[in-house]
Image (spheres, rainbow, N blue to C red):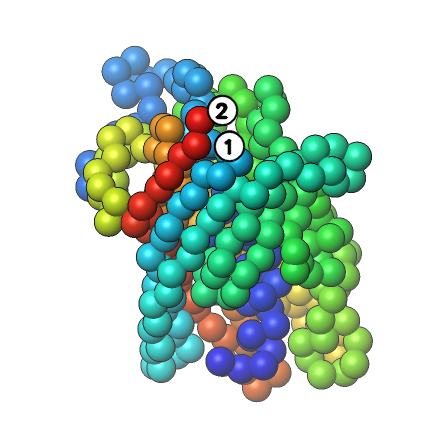
Amino acid sequence: MSRHANRLETVLLFVALGLLWLPLPVAAGSCGEASGAAETIAAAEEYFPDTKGSRWKYRGQVVESPLQKIAAGSFHNISTVQGVEPLKGVSVKVFHDTNPGNHGPSNSYYRRDAVGIVYYGSRPGTPLEKQLVPYQIVRFPLVCPSSFQQLNRKGLDLGSDLDGDEKDERVDVEASVSVVGRESIVVPAGTYQDAIRLEARMKMWIHLTSANQTALGTDVMTAWFARGVGLIKYVERQELPPIKSDRGLVTEITEELEEAEIKTQ
């Protein structure tokens, strides 16, 4: 992987961590299938457990494909709810991941209340992420199908020099989340009926300072959540643009649940 693509991939990763928690179908079904109308998911908070001590173990795979060259690797990630901390004047839940997306350990911070779940960032994070947080990742009541815009920010500091002119690039960011449907999903931990499928889409327009040029990076993440369990699978596809002599990079990341231990209140 090139040095410039690696920097941009890291930026996309830490923004996408917030999209992930909200990181294929065997039998798909749309929401409100019988009536054709939108459906409000009852007790939606049960799809996103965050009790201290809860633990999830995932098996993952990363496939990178710059042009003809393809590299694949497997990894494991263990996610644990460590407790509550004060952050930006509110109490947030702390999730520790040992190796999300095969990028090493990190902590992520979330707040859940009656109107949804808000992402407060991660450590280690990036300069760009610090300009974006906090932002909402799930809205309650959870209506299926539905969507909302998470982010629409322009002229931010990317925090990285991608074109080698010793100046950090500027970037515009747009992101949205959609509740798509209910599906039956098979993962190593078992079969989960009526899992909720969410899709998060992000675009980054990177304005290179060395030339009158804009490069587009995209991140699409599909995630499935089971009632009483939480995240059981996600598939993420990152497309990073060519910078200078780079050929660009397409990365696909998958994590599937192997085992879970959900603590009660």
Q: Residue at x 28, y 29 (%)?
A: 194
Q: Kindly indicate the quadrant of the structure image that contains residue 28.
A: top left
Q: Kindly indicate the quadrant of the structure image that contains residue 42.
A: top left
Q: Count residues near mark 1 (Cα–Cα under 10 Å), then give few for <14, some for 14-19, many for 20+.
A: some
Residue 172 seen in render: no
Residue 77, position as x, y percentages in the image? 42, 57
Q: Count residues near mark 2 (Cα–Cα under 10 Å), then give few for <14, some for 14-19, many for 20+.
A: few
Q: Residue furthest top?
A: 35
Residue 103, position as x, y percentages in the image? 51, 65
Residue situated in front as seen by the camera: 93 or 72? 93
Label number found at residue 172: none
Return the residue at label 2: 265
Circle 2: element type = loop
Q: Residue at x 35, y 42 (%)?
A: 260
Return the residue at label 1: 51
Report how far apart the C-alphas of labels 1 and 2 lie in the structure. Answer: 7 Å
Residue 20, position as x, y percentages in the image? 49, 46
Q: Amino acid at mark 1?
A: Thr
* On screen, residue 221 above or below 119: below
